Amino acid sequence: MLDGLFKPRSVAIIGASNNPLSIGHIVIQNLVDHNFRGPIYPINPKSNCIKSFKAYPSISDVPDEIDLVNISIKNTLVPIVLEECGKKGVKFAIVHTAGFKEVGEKGRELEKQIVEIAHKHGMRIYGPNSQGIQNSDPEVSVYANFTFVPQIPGNISIVAQSGGVGETFKLQLYNIGKGTRMYSSFGNEADVTMNEIIDYYGQDEDTKVIMTHIETLKDPAGFLEVASRVTKKKPILALKTGRTSEGVAAVASHTGSLIEQDTLADAIFEKSGVLRFHDQQEMIEAAIAFSDQPIPKSDKIVIVTNTGGPAIIAVDECISRGLQLAELSPDTGKALGELLFSEAIVSNPVDVIATAGAKEYGGTVELLLKDPNIDSLILNFVTPPFVDCEAVARKLGEIGSTADKPIVCIILTIEEKFGKVIRLIRESGVPVFDFPESASKALAAMIKYGQVLQREEPEYIKYDCDTAKAKDIIARHSGSGKFLPQADVFDLLGCYGIPIAKVVRVENKDEHKKAAQKLTYPLVLKVDSEDVVHKSDAGGVILDIEDESALLKAFDEMAGKFAQYKPAFIVQEQLTDGREVIIGSKASEGVAPMVMFGLGGVFVETLKDVQFRLAPLSRQDADNMITAIKGYPILKGTRGEKPADIDKLAEVLIRISQLAGDFPEIEEMDLNPVFAFEEGKGVAVVDARLKILGK
Ligand code: ADP
Ligand code: MG
C-alpha cells in the first residue's frame, strides 16, 4: 500500500533551506505552489523559519504525525536522520540524495544500511538517488519532487526509471495543456519498486493510462505478474531503452547469440499485454489518445479527409501496422452520396473535398460513427481559407465529445491564424496531431490494446512425460556448465515425447555394425564431442552415406580429423523432404525461460527471423510464434506446395516449453534443424545442443 507515499497527510523536508538553489528549498516551493493540502514541516537545525514556515531542528521535534519526508542531505548523514524518522513513525522517506549504489561498493553498503534502518521501523525508502513523487488528486495535490514542470490534473500516470525521460513525458503533455494524475521517478529502487508503483496506479480509479520508462527490469517475474493484472483494466505503455547494449552474453550456440536482455523484455511485454514503444514522441502521442478516447472494438477504421495526399499517407501507415480499411455499409454510402458535393469520394478514405463546411464534414463524421462496419475514425482536416473552419471545428468538437468510437485528428494549419480550430477540437477530447503518421500510430496502439483486452484465456496443455528419466539425465550433468553429449540430449527429448531422427551413439568405428543394424541407409555420421560445437563447420557431419563401405570410410575420415578430442560418434538416419526449422530455449535470471522458433539455415543466421515467447507456452502462444515469423509462407506452402505439419510443430514448441520450464538448470537448448514434414507427417529433430548451467 503506497498511500502514505502518494497521498501523504503531512510532509517534512529534511535539508530544508532558504537557498533557492537547493533541493530542500525547491521541494517546499513546489508543495506550496501546488497547494499541498496538508501541513509542511521544514527541518533545519540552524534556522527557525524557512519560506515563512516554522522550521524544526529535527524530525523528533515536530509536534504532528508525519507520513512522508523528503531527504536531501549528505549521503553519509542519511542513516542518522532515517533512524530518527523511524522512531518518529514516518511512513515513507523519499531520498533525493545520490551517492549510493550508483557510485560503487561503499555506496552499495550505505544503501543496504538505510533500507535495514527503515525496515526495522516499518518505514519504506523511496530511492535513493530519486526525483520524487507527485499526485494531482485534488484531495492531496502533492508535488514532493524537485522538478519544474507545473502540475495540472489529468488521468495519465507516469513512472520513470530516468527522471529526465519522465520529465520529458510530463513536459510534452503540459505543453498541449494535458495534465497528469500521478508521477514518480524512483531512482535506485532500493526498497519501493517500480512494480509496486505500477500496481498502485493500476488500482487508482482515476488513472486511465500508465506510461513507464524502463532501463532494466529489476524483478522481471514480478513485473510480468503485476503488468498482466493491470493491463486487463488499463493500458501500460512502456519505453524500454538500452536496447542496443550487449545484453546477455552471446554464447556458442545460435539461440544464445540471438537472445539479449531486450528480447526478454519483449517476451515479457508480449505475455503481459504491455505496449512497447521505441520512440518517446510516439508513446506520448499514444498516451494522449488513450487518455481521452474509448478503446476501439476492432481494427476496422475509416479515414475522412478534405485533401487527398495526407489521407494516402494515413492509409499506408495504418495498413502497415495491420489495421483494416472498413468497407462502408451501403446505407452509409447512400447517405454520404446525398450529403456531399458531387466531386466528393464516397469510399474509404472518404474525401469530402476542400469546400466541405461544417454541414458536410460534420455530417460525414456523424454518419460514419453510426456505421456498424466502422470502429474508429481518423480525420484529416486542412483549414481552407474559403471555408468557415471554426464552424467545422466546433461541429467536430461537439461530435467528438460524445462519440462512443475513438476519433483521432490531424490538422494541417497555421497555428497563429487557426489556433482556435485546434483548441476547439482538442478541448473536446479529440487528440490533434500534426502528421497523419502520428495519428495513425496512436490509433494503431489503441487498436493493439483493444486486442489485448479481447485475448482469449490462454489454453495450457501439460503433456505426460517421463520426468523421472529426464531428471536422471540432467542430474548426471548437474552444474557442469557444459554441452551434453548429443545422445543424452536425444534421450531427454524422447522423455518429453519430442520426435527425433533415428540415431545410435557409438564409441568408435568398431561399433559401426551395431549402428547399421538398427538403422536404414542412407545414414549420416556426426562427431559427438563437447569440443566440437558447430560440427559441420569443422567437417564433423558426413551426409549421404549409402552403404557399409561408405560408412567405414566416413569413420576413417572423422577419426583422422578429430583424433585429438578422442570423440564418440553418432550415426543417424538421413531424412528428406522436410522444411528445416529451429526451436530453442534460453534460461533467464529471475523469470521463466524463453522459447524460440524460426526457420533454420540462412534464415536464422542472416535474417534473424525468429520469435521468442516466455514459457509456459499456451496453445495460442505456440500458434502465434509460428505465424509471426516472416518466413511463415514457406511453412504454409507456396506455389502448390503442401503445407508443413504446423500443428505438430506447435505441439513440439509446447513440449519444449514444458521441458525448459521443468528444468531451470537448462541454460539453453538449440534444436537446429528440426525437419517439419508435410501436414500429417510430423516433425523430427536431427540436431540438438543443450547446455547445463555451471555452478
Ligand atoms: P551442426 O549444426 O553442428 O553443424 P547438424 O547436425 O545440424 O550439425 O548438421 C548440419 C546440417 O546437415 C543440418 O543443418 C542439416 O541440413 C544436415 N543434416 C544433419 N543431419 C541430418 C539428417 N539426419 N538428415 C538430413 N539432413 C541432416
Ligand atoms: Mg545444427
Image (tube, rainbow, N blue to C red):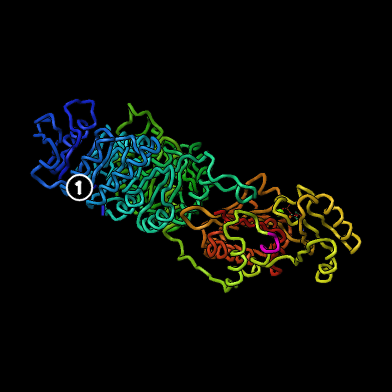
Q: Quadrant of ligand 1?
A: bottom right
User: Which residue has dot 1 on it?
Assistant: 86
Observer-nearest of 391 and 412: 412
Q: Is residue 641 magenta?
A: no
Observer-nearest of 215 and 303: 215
The x and y percentages for residue 366 are 36, 50
- Magenta region, main secondary structure: helix
In the image, residue 231 sits, relative to residue 155, either above or below, namely: below
At a point 41% along the width and 51% down the height, the residue shown is: 219
Q: The C terminus appears in which quarter of the rendering?
A: bottom right
Q: The residue tagged with tag 1: helix, strand or loop?
A: helix
Residue 674: quadrant of the picture:
bottom right
Observer-nearest of 371 and 568: 568
At a point 15% along the width and 46% down the height, the residue shown is: 66
At a point 10% along the width and 41% down the height, the residue shown is: 61
Provide the residue span drawn in magenta: 485-489
| Residue 295 shown left or right of residue 121 in the figure | right
The x and y percentages for residue 259 are 57, 48
